[in-house]
Amino acid sequence: MAEKIWMVAGEASGDARSAELMRSLLERRPDLRFAGAGGPKMAGMAGRPFDNWIADAGVLGLWDVLKRYGYFKAKFDSMIRAITEYTPDAVVLVDYPGFNLRLAKALRKRLPKLRVIYYVSPQVWAWNRGRIPKMAKWLDLMLCIFPFERDLYEASGLRTEFVGHPIVERLRKDRMEVPREAGLVGLFPGSREREVKRNFPVMAGAAKRILASHPETQFEAAAASGAHVDMMQAAAKAEGVAIRTVAGDAHGLMQRAGVGIVCSGTATLEAAYFGLPYALIYRTAWLTYAIGKRLVKVPHLGIANILAGRTVVREFIQDSATPGALADEMLRLMNHSEARQELADDLRHVIELLGGPGASDRAARAILETLGSEGRSREDAIPANSDNHE
């Protein structure tokens, strides 16, 4: 009888990572069957009815979750029932820790023999390390994407594998041989509407200040959608600055711009991969920020700085994320080629820590080993990330 895997992802990024993993699993076990909840990419790989819920599940911030508590409670209860009826051989939870960790706990209690696997480990090391021993009781396997995570989880007795970061393989195909434009500033306000609303007016204000001393500077912004283009153009017009705004070319802009301002999140790793000298911006709702400031136990917000163990990229968070401060940092990088080169070199070393291409492939092999379907061999070892900056 074909083995069955229930997959759960709650955001667009998780949908993409899950689909990559499902593809790798099917390459080794074409008879595997998938069910669960996620997005359109997962549904396409499953080839059968799938709960496409990410449009409703992908909320941002504590306040958004509280407003929709009833929806998430109902979805949680219905998913427990559905998993119980489906009787999968394993459940694979992908990122989305607010929901997925609670689901893991409930499944361990209700279905103690069910194998529960977590891919893209939650960053509890940043806000609640005391939760790791509890996770060791709920999970059978943790698949982490940052090298320092393995020791943290294994210390609790949880079987853990560092499979490398999927971003390395995903971005490899987007690398271009294009010269950087020294006078071009790239602006990356985020992919969510709330991020754009909070970040882009500050970026436009910084552009206005830069133009006051360097009127020849050009600005280009990456938008996630046409609707975001309109929103960003309105903000630029309010500041009286000309900012070219394009949807769908963030990776190209990261390779053409001389410097940039990047919203905290996956885009900062993308910028690091492409070697863009940048500053990090993070602005969120005050309630989310106030609670997060109390909970977060790491000295840096940006993952590049966390991986480096020191400040590589300068961070401008909440009150410090002002147009003047961001303009000063852009001008520092624009005016000093040594500073730009030092930052680019540091970012290259950070990316090398993430392992080479093939994260989903290594994750699939670890999952099949847990299912007893496939053993590991030496070729599964994580190679050095030799493709970076070829």
Image (spheres, rainbow, N blue to C red):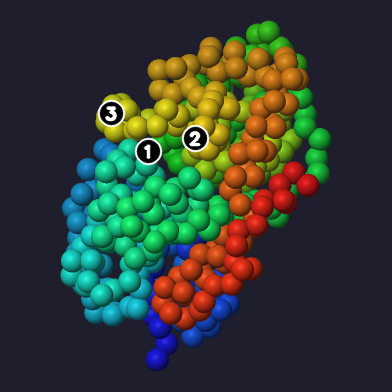
Query: What residue is pinned by disc 2?
Result: 306
Query: What residue is pinned by disc 3?
Result: 294
The quadrant of the image that shows the N terminus is: bottom left
Proximity of marks 1 and 3: CB atoms separated by less than 8 Å: no
Proximity of marks 3 and 2: CB atoms separated by less than 8 Å: no
| Residue type at tag 2 | Ile
Query: What residue is pinned by disc 1?
Result: 126
Disc nearer the start of the sequence (1/2)? 1
Q: Secondary structure at mark 2?
A: helix
Proximity of marks 1 and 2: CB atoms separated by less than 8 Å: yes
Q: Residue at x 42, y 73 (%)?
A: 370
Q: Relative to the observer, which residue lies in front, 107 or 162? A: 162
Is residue 59 depicted above or below 208 in this figure?
below
Q: Residue at x 45, y 29 (%)?
A: 300
Q: Secondary structure at mark 1?
A: helix
Nearest to the eye among marks 3 and 2: give it: 2
Is residue 170 depicted above or below 298 in this figure?
below
Disc nearer the start of the sequence (3/2)? 3
